[in-house]
Amino acid sequence: MKPSKAADGALMSDLIRELVFAYFRLRAAGDELAIRYGQSTGKWGMMRSLREGGPQSVSQIARSRPVARQGVQRMANELARDGLIEFVDNPTHRRAKLMKLTLTGEKILTRLRQSELRWTGGFARRFSRRDIEKALEVVRALKNTLSRA
């Protein structure tokens, strides 16, 4: 017998609640890791987005998260002040500069990634590869569904 739609909704609600609480704990742990390199999880994420997506404007990063553009601008200014990103001309917009990682930013991001992999490796040993892949599939599908909503 197939569970009712209401039961499916309640189960999804439980999953989302667990994801939210896991996010808060992950964010706190990520901040502890990032602070060793003088960063926050927000700045770390922004640098990772620039590495993965190439040079982007403040507005592009803000839309992809979605977060306030002003907060992204503040982080961008701090990262630029610290020499981790630079602002470069944008061929598609005269006034909106693009942010780009500097060599120093690349090095910090590489160190952060190495620390992250050591940390997450400890968790990975507690789960089967199949379970991790299934969880990743479900969370990505949820993210994509929310992106279209």
Image (cartoon, rainbow, N blue to C red):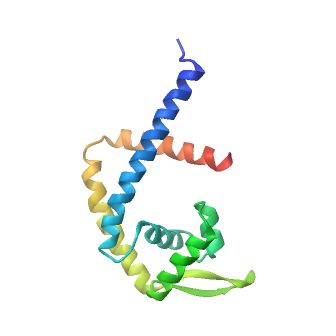
* Residue 54 in view in this figure: no
Where residue 87 appears, as percent x and y from the top left, is 58, 86
Task: Tally the numbered discs.
Answer: 0
**Which quarter of the rendered picture does the C terminus lie within?**
top right
Residue closest to the eye, 122 or 46: 46
Name which quarter of the figure residue 26 lies in.
Answer: bottom left
- State the residue in front, 62 or 85: 62
Residue at coordinates 24% horizontally, 53% vertically from top-left?
122
Taking the image as drawn, is residue 22 in sight? Answer: yes
Q: Quadrant of residue 93?
A: bottom right
- Residue 86 image position (x, y, % from top left): 53, 86
* Percent of width and height locating residue 96: 69, 82
**Residue placed farthest to the top in the image?**
1
Q: Is residue 130 left or right of residue 87?
A: left
- Could you tell me which residue is drawn at 33 percent across and 72 percent down? 35
Give the percent coordinates (x, y) of residue 139: 49, 44
Q: Is residue 126 above or below residue 35?
A: above
Q: Is residue 33 above or below residue 146?
A: below
Q: Quadrant of residue 19?
A: top left
Residue at 26% across, 61% down = 118
Q: Is 60 placed left or right of 114 in the picture?
A: right
